[in-house]
Amino acid sequence: MPLSPDAADDSSHEDTPSLNPNLTDHLSSRPPRSRTADDYLDGIRAGDRVALSRAITLLESTRSDHRDTARTLVEQCLPHAGDSLRVAVTGVPGVGKSTFIETLGTHLVEESHRIAILAVDPSSERSGGSILGDKTRMGALASHDNVYIRPSPTGGSLGGVARTTRESIFLCEAAGFDLILVETVGVGQAEVKVHSMVDVFLLLALAGAGDELQGMKRGIVEMADLIAINKADGDNRNAAEEARAEYGTALRLLGEMASGWTPPVLTCSAEHDEGVREVWASIREYQTHTTESGFFREQRRRQARHWMYQAIDDALRDDFFSTPAVETARADIEDEVLRGERSSCAAAQTLLSIYRDALADQ
């Protein structure tokens, strides 16, 4: 069966090699300021990964003209998007997400799949930069012609995903990638963000690191469609089996999922390539189950609605903080809050009143 049953609903990162150098030359011949959404779309549809990288950078830009072009591009990509399987791979730092993805990806490219990996790096709280090290950690996979790896900073976004990750998925699908893997930071904050943009939520867990369930928020376990205990090798095999039983018990206590699916708990060792194929087989089994029940399509419809309202929230927040009157008053009002002279709620209402007055005067 196809990976998905229905069709949808200047670069800051190093560009990966292009599948079509001629189209790269075409895009590069246009000065950045004069590149249109059509220019990017032509390159993306032809499999030009440089054009894809530059288009994703356009999505991440805060410039208003870039955002306008990016919005147009996403709309143009929608008719060509949706025909993929979107899988989130999450878990605490050190669980082996990158190793798992590289091992799984190596198998799947041998089966002629085209894989896009959106590896979201934690932004530095101090510098605002990000680690962006996934291409190094997935060296063998990154060199494959049918694999595209895009590291993107979270930019302070909660949930371990960049604000533009969902739109990046559409662009990758329009470029012909049939499997989208989203590797999240695994920080445990509002993981619902990544859950609301993928078809399958895979939770990687560890054994032998204390009380496994104590270290994992209940909400993340509730969202998991599949749990895999990684690093189940050597002396850790018995501990992995114990963790498997513990997670299985926890899942049974949580009750039935909306999809009608009972999440399996498996063990694997990505480093030694043990059990990874079984995890993939379970992912495909889940896809078959949700496709036949209609849950797959309905979930994508709900996700599209969710992200419509999320886009409104983001736009309102950006407009609020960029309003000159708010910018002028904000520092003084914030200082009053810090000195205890004004409550947080009263300060918020004052700034909102300033914002509304500014809108009324326009």
Image: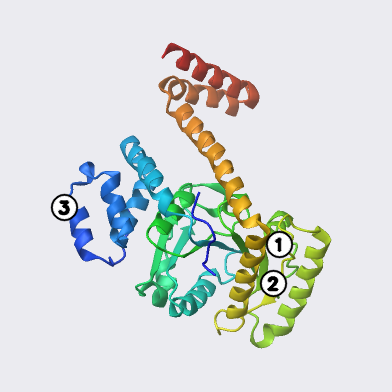
Q: Residue at x 31, y 65 (%)?
A: 16
Q: Is residue 240 left or right of residue 70?
A: right
Closer to the camera, 12 or 124?
A: 12
- Callout 2 amino acid: Ala
Q: Residue at x 16, y 52 (%)?
A: 29
Residue 126, can we see it?
Answer: no
Q: Which mark is residue 215?
A: 1
Look at the numbered disc 1 and give the secondary structure of its residue.
Answer: loop
- Callout 3 amino acid: Ser
Furthest-left residue in this view: 29
Nearest to N terminus: mark 3 or mark 1: 3
Q: CA distance from mark 2 to mark 3?
A: 54 Å
Nearest to N terminus: mark 1 or mark 2: 2
Q: Residue at x 49, y 61 (%)?
A: 84
Position of residue 94 measured from the top left corner of the image (x, y, whole percent) = 57, 69
Look at the numbered disc 3 and give the secondary structure of its residue.
Answer: loop
Position of residue 48 measured from the top left corner of the image (x, y, whole percent) = 29, 61
Position of residue 159 measured from the top left corner of the image (x, y, whole percent) = 58, 51
Which residue, given by chain and number where applicable, does mark 2 sit on? 209
Q: Which mark is residue 50?
A: none
Q: Is residue 123 left or right of residue 342?
A: left
9 shown above or below 230: above
Q: Residue at x 54, y 26 (%)?
A: 334
Position of residue 187 measured from the top left corner of the image (x, y, whole percent) = 59, 56
Q: Check contact, mark 1 vs mark 2: CB within 8 A.
A: yes
Residue 311, can we see it?
Answer: yes
Q: Check contact, mark 3 vs mark 1: CB within 8 A.
A: no
User: Quarter-wise, where is residue 309 in the image?
Assistant: top right
**Scheme by which the image is coloured:** rainbow
Q: Check contact, mark 2 vs mark 3: CB within 8 A.
A: no
Which residue, given by chain and number where applicable, does mark 3 sit on? 29
